[in-house]
Image (tube, helix red, strand yellow):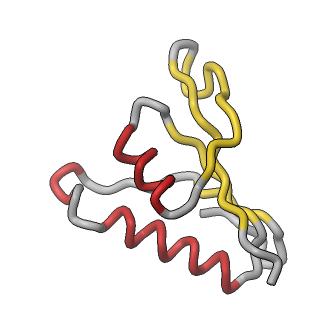
């Protein structure tokens, strides 16, 4: 995760779980911890990119409240796109 201490925005650049450890809640725990850290730093928005073909990752991000911003053509390579997702926090 990348964020300046006083930033209004943060970006999750990498979140990975070893194949043999998947479907055990580790990804959700890592993501939840990152979100909580952003909340303590008063970040207003978290963004990330994900391959649309990575259904388990898409499901996890949507489960915790991320929304699709847009599709970015050729993000990973000429034939691999990405969704940019975001999670906004309430101003209160």
Choose top left, top right, bottom left or bottom right for residue 26.
bottom left
Q: Residue furthest top?
A: 78
Q: Is residue 51 left or right of residue 8?
A: left
The picture places residue 13, in percent across and down from the top left corner, at: 58, 52
Of the 4 image quadrants, the one containing the C terminus is: bottom right
Determine whether 41 is above or below 27 in the image. Answer: below
Q: Is residue 74 left or right of residue 30?
A: right
The picture places residue 14, in percent across and down from the top left corner, at: 50, 53
Q: Is residue 86 left or right of residue 52?
A: right
Residue lying at 47% horizontally and 66% vertically, measured from the top left: 31
The picture places residue 81, in percent across and down from the top left corner, at: 56, 24
Residue lying at 67% horizontally and 53% vertically, measured from the top left: 86
Give 6 or 73, whichever is nearer the viewer: 73
Q: Is residue 61 left or right of residue 21?
A: right
Determine whether 53 is above or below 34 in the image. Answer: above
Of the 4 image quadrants, the one containing the N terminus is: bottom right
Residue lying at 26% horizontally and 54% vertically, measured from the top left: 18
Determine whether 34 is above or below 40 in the image. Answer: above
Residue lying at 31% horizontally and 56% vertically, measured from the top left: 17
Number of numbered tags placed on the structure image:
0
The picture places residue 64, in percent across and down from the top left corner, at: 50, 64
């Amino acid at each position: 995760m990348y964020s300046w201490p006083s930033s209004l925005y943060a970006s999750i650049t990498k979140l990975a779980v070893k194949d043999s450890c998947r479907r055990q809640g580790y990804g959700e725990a890592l993501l939840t911890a990152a979100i909580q850290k952003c909340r303590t730093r008063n970040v207003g928005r978290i963004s990330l990119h994900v391959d649309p073909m990575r259904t388990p990752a898409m499901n996890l991000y949507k489960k915790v409240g991320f929304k699709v911003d847009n599709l970015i053509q050729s993000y990973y390579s000429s034939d691999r796109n990405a969704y940019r997702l975001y999670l906004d926090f309430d101003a209160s």
